[in-house]
Image (tube, rainbow, N blue to C red):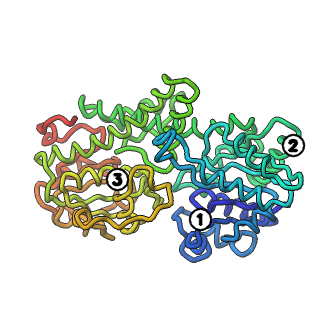
Amino acid sequence: MVKICCIGAGYVGGPTMAVIAAKCPDVEVVVVDISAPRIEGWNSERLPIYEPGLDDVVKQCRGRNLFFSTDVERHVADAGIVFVSVNTPTKTRGLGAGKAADLTYWESAARIIADVSRSDKIVVEKSTVPVKTAEAIEKILTHNSKGGIKYQILSNPEFLAEGTAIQDLFSPDRVLIGGRETPDGRAAVSALKSIYARWVPDDRIITTNLWSAELSKLAANAFLAQRISSVNAISALCEATGADVTEVANSIGKDSRIGPRFLSASVGFGGSCFQKDILNLVYICECYGLPEVANYWRQVIRINDYQKSRFVNRVVSSMFNTVAGKKVAVLGFAFKKDTGDTRETPAIDVCKGLVGDKAVVSIYDPQVTEEQVQRDLVMNKFDWDHPRHLQPMSPSAAKHVAVSWDAYEAARGAHAVCILTEWDEFRRLDYQRMYDAMHKPAFLFDGRNVVDPDKLRRIGFVVYSIGKPLDHWLRDMPAVA
């Protein structure tokens, strides 16, 4: 079997290659990255990312047929299949700023491949890329090819959900492989398919042309985000009318044409893909002269932003229209449970909104470090996906934000608690103990519908749960804009 090399040791490249190595013990798999600290992390006992089950898979294969290295050129040169899993962040300046994907890192990877290759290669797009990216990559590789070396570009987008990524890799809904509809293209598709066929049933391996595969990834994320924004829009109406969004979602989810997944109302969606991919889709639609389509998908982002600002406004208006000088405990900073990933987490905008109103914010998350919290709160929009020198939080901002390693300590002396991540441990907390240590009236704002609001009201909390009938106290407060 050929050697496999993956450029990029992030949330996609590391786990994906670890599972390929586990399922294909006769294949040498090397993950390369120019970041020495990241590679050191993958070679250590504490991996650079948290994902349930990942530690076991890596430790099973590392040093046997799975390797992590900073020697990018050597391993790319030796490989027959090269996966590229580098960042494709949203552009922050120039043409398409704020929407278009920045393909700088992809172009750099392509030039490295062309420069060091001594044999024909299959190059696999693993990153999420705009439609027709493969065409641009082909041109770079072809015009820089040495000695008649040939390249076949394949699109093999990932469909992983953080928190269940290893499970998703071991038992995927589908594996999508797109390639050129030529003899060489079909041969390359067959070669990659034979890798996945070691453990994925044939009926779950879908083959398409290149452009269908590239667009399918953007469309899939757009559809998932659309469902979240749809139920969040309904949650606002539920609060206004006295309906319960959980009951509404359960009712419509029983319809087999709709189904129950991604119908949990929340403070908003986050993660590295949804917003970035929708903005990319919007830009592509605009470029192809489809403004109505672009506006349709842009509204998914607008509803998500509205949900976050609506949550902050609810907190402030409920607490006598000011949180200045008041301690607010934030439980959960990751964008979802079972991950330490904070990219585009709703907690960033909520915390910034509270600090902007002079609240003193105390944050607890079981998987997010204080350093990461501080970095996230000083970054500008989209900067999280661009390498940059991160300045520490300014002294004026730092005095308004603290990070605790205990939920009870975070809530001690607080006027309110905001639940922003649905960690299972938050369902098991002793809320009586928490209530006893808080200022009264004690508010609890549940942005994930984690707690039983009636049970907490009996303790004494004033409770707000997304999309649920309002506490009588909150009904008397001014309407939230």
- The amino acid type of the residue labelled 3 equals Ala
Tell me which residue sits at (43%, 57%) in the image. Answer: 342
Camera-side residue of 219 and 432: 219
At 34% from the left and 61% from the top, the residue drawn is 428
Label 1's element? helix
From mark 2 to mark 1, how far is it between C-alphas? Answer: 35 Å
Q: Quadrant of residue 68?
A: bottom right
**Residue 432: percent from the left, percent from the top?**
21, 61
The percent coordinates of residue 134 (x first, y second) are 70, 42
Whichever of labels 2 and 1 marks the residue nearer the N terminus, that label is: 1
Residue at 14%, 55% (x, y): give it.
324
**Horizontal and vertical percent position of residue 171:** 66, 51
**Mark 3 or mark 2: whose residue is earlier in sequence:** 2
Above or below, 219 against 58 in this view is above
Disc 3 marks which residue? 347
User: In this rendering, is residue 200 above or below 53?
Assistant: above
Q: Residue at x 29, y 54 (%)?
A: 351
> Around disc 2, counting alpha carbons within 10 Å, would you say few (fewer than 14), some (14 to 19), or many (20 or more)?
some
Which residue position holds label 2? 184
Q: Amino acid at mark 2?
A: Asp
Distance CA(mark 3)–CA(mark 2): 48 Å
Pair 3/1: label in front: 3
Q: Which of the image's four quarters has the C terminus?
A: top left
Q: Please, what is the three-letter code of the amino acid marked with disc 1?
A: Leu
Left or right of residue 193, residue 164 in this image: left
Identify the image quadrant of the N terminus.
Answer: bottom right
Q: Judging from the image, what secondary structure is the residue with disc 3 in? A: helix
Q: Secondary structure at mark 2?
A: helix
